[in-house]
Image (cartoon, helix red, strand yellow):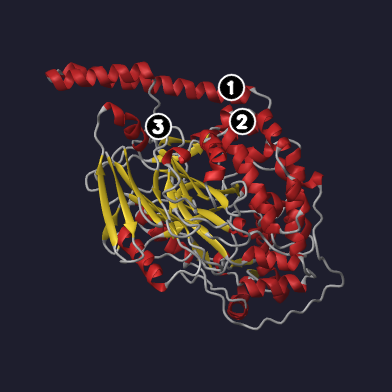
Amino acid sequence: SGYLACAISSQTAVLNHHLVTLNTNDSDKDLIRFFTIHSSFLNFLVINARSLLNKISTLKTIALLAKPSLIFVTETWCSSSVTDSELAIQDYMLYRGNREYRRGGGCLIYVVPESVWISVNTQNYSLLFGCIYRTPNTSTTVDNTINNAFVHTSALNYNAKVITCDFNLHRIDWNVEMHCWTQCVHSPTRYNNILDLVFCHDVTPLSLQVSKELETSDHKMILCILHFNRNLSHPNNRKLRKTRLYRDYKNVDWNLLHALLSCSDWDNFFLTNNLTEALDIFYQINDSCLDSIAPIKISNIIKSNDLYIPLHYRIKLRRLQKCYFKSNDFSAVVEITMTYNQLKEVHRLNAIKEEVSAMDSGSKIQNLVRLFNKRLKPSWNSDIPCILRDGILINDHNIIVNLFSDFFANRGKPLDDIEVEMISSATNYMKSVTFTYDNICKSIKSLRTSSSCGVDGLASIYFKLGGPNMPLILLGLFDLSLTAGTYPSRWKTSYICPRFKSGDRTNLHNYRPINITPVISRIMENIVCDKISDRLLIFNFQHGFLKTRSCMTCHFEFFNLIFTERSLGHLVLVLYLDISKAFDMVNHRLLMSKHFSYGVKNPLLAWLNSFLSHRHQIVKINSTLSKAEPVASGVIQGRVLGPLLFIAYVNDICKYDLKIVYSFPPHEFAHTFCSVTAELNKVAVWCSKWKLDLNAS
């Protein structure tokens, strides 16, 4: 084991290396234990102390409670006059870079002016950590040195690299990637600015929280958790085990959650009129409570077999397998076959028993549907082994998710700079939606109980069992959002799960995107959807995505028309039209103009516009995530508000009296055919006006 300390010298602008070898004698056992992490998780704390010495007792308490693997401190304000014993924390080794000639500055990890670097080897997975402090108004030479350090470090042979720093740069867009480095702090750390940063290379934080200030410091602390695959070996010769991250909700003490939420400080949340500030407080408290009651765990993804094999049968089969390979005794193969036949018979009898039990219960239909869904092979793609791209078979999940991300992001059309005339024919207007404790409770109750979650990490089970205070908290958040006419940016990022349709499984075109949005956004969407559905004046010809209507009601009405006309001796001609990538092609500006014409006004109209704009999507396969891609157009399909917005977009096609079903006597076929051609031309004109494409295939 060892550590690598690299210093950036502002005088020489050279990146120097200093290697220290750790011996394995008894005196170094604590040191080796510290640098060899035997967990799949590594958490670290980032602090701007603004004088560490007078806050060291508080930092010791934080270290005892949070137990971070590493602590990075900038602005220690320490010089050589401060001894190591004054800064020591039990069970932590101390490495420091002092600032000798001026007040302020200094870096520390719990080795060299303004920059400290350390290498950690954890179960054959090497990570490089750096800590940098950049003074305000620093020279261009030092800035170039720091930039060169990022370039140099990105090329070093480590599985992952992390740099924490206080850059003292205001009003900077830190979302821009630089030499494959990604900045992961997105909440202000000092007033309204993001000054304290965490740059990651080849690793994505599992969790990153911006906490409170350390005593009198005006910089907030950052707690970050990294996850790495503990089974990784040499990068050129390793077998990746597929894993997933989850929270164990089965063993949660929900009474403890109710107590934690009740005891949390919600004063600033209810007093603020700033939506962003309220969201930060909401997630900070809820993430903290969630980590207390249901910490993140990791499990291996095991491919499920159609035939479940109990433990005693597995032991027997292993024994027979060893027997055959040792002695080539064919009787072992015969016995293995007999054992599998016994298992199949047990499986068949258990299936019959399940069916009889479902039929004997009071809720026959619900139980049979549940049993059917249980046995149905899911089309969800928890694993996509490979994708064919330009004749090359790709099986790296990190590449596959980004291929899907690029493919799904380019499905829609970019927004055209078109002038949209906002004309309203409505006599009364709808400007807002009233949120109440009762309708929020109703919306939460309608959610399906599940432990799956969106990008924000909060599952539906958390809201459903979160106690009586949860609807009250959401009420304050929803009111702020609608009053401001702003849909929170945290809710605009969706996970995309590729779902296989048909055909070749290695072809990207044979998958469609399924959006997984944050649960909290669905709660709000449910209420908004209920309130505005009547306002949109949907024609009775529409059966999709509406309450009390479905494909079944559409089929009943359609076949009733067919049977009626055929009983009169008429021929029936039906036109089937398909809009290519329908949900993805909806133009946001045109959609807003339609809502305005229905009488929807600000702030509700502004909220709907905010709901649609500046969205991002991340493709997720197992625990592998793609980069975030912007969504230029379209509405979210498969969710609450998206389908209603699509119906509103195509609703006025009924005004044109377009026909897709024709009934006529046999002798009028030629005349009817001309009418059909005219109707198809009218459909084409309507689609062109509203930027939709008919699928000709």
Pinpoint residue 230: horizontal percent, then vertical percent.
34, 38
Disc 1 to disc 3, how far (Cα)? 21 Å
Say what amino acid the circle numbered 2 marks: Asn
In the image shown, does 144 or 79 lie closer to the viewer?
79
Pinpoint residue 14: horizontal percent, then vertical percent.
29, 64
Q: Which residue is mark 3?
A: 306
Category of crowding for the residue at label 3, using alpha-carbon neighbours closer than 10 angstroms: few (below 14), some (14–19), many (at least 20): few
Q: Which mark is residue 367?
A: 2
The total number of labels drawn is 3
Q: Which residue is mark 1?
A: 357
Disc 3 to disc 2, how far (Cα)? 21 Å
Say what amino acid the circle numbered 3 marks: Asp
At 31% from the left edge and 18% from the top edge, which residue is drawn? Answer: 315
Give the quarter of the figure containing the N terminus: top left
- Report the mark closest to the observer, 1 or 3: 3
Label whose residue precedes the other's in the sequence (3 or 2): 3
Label whose residue precedes the other's in the sequence (1 or 3): 3
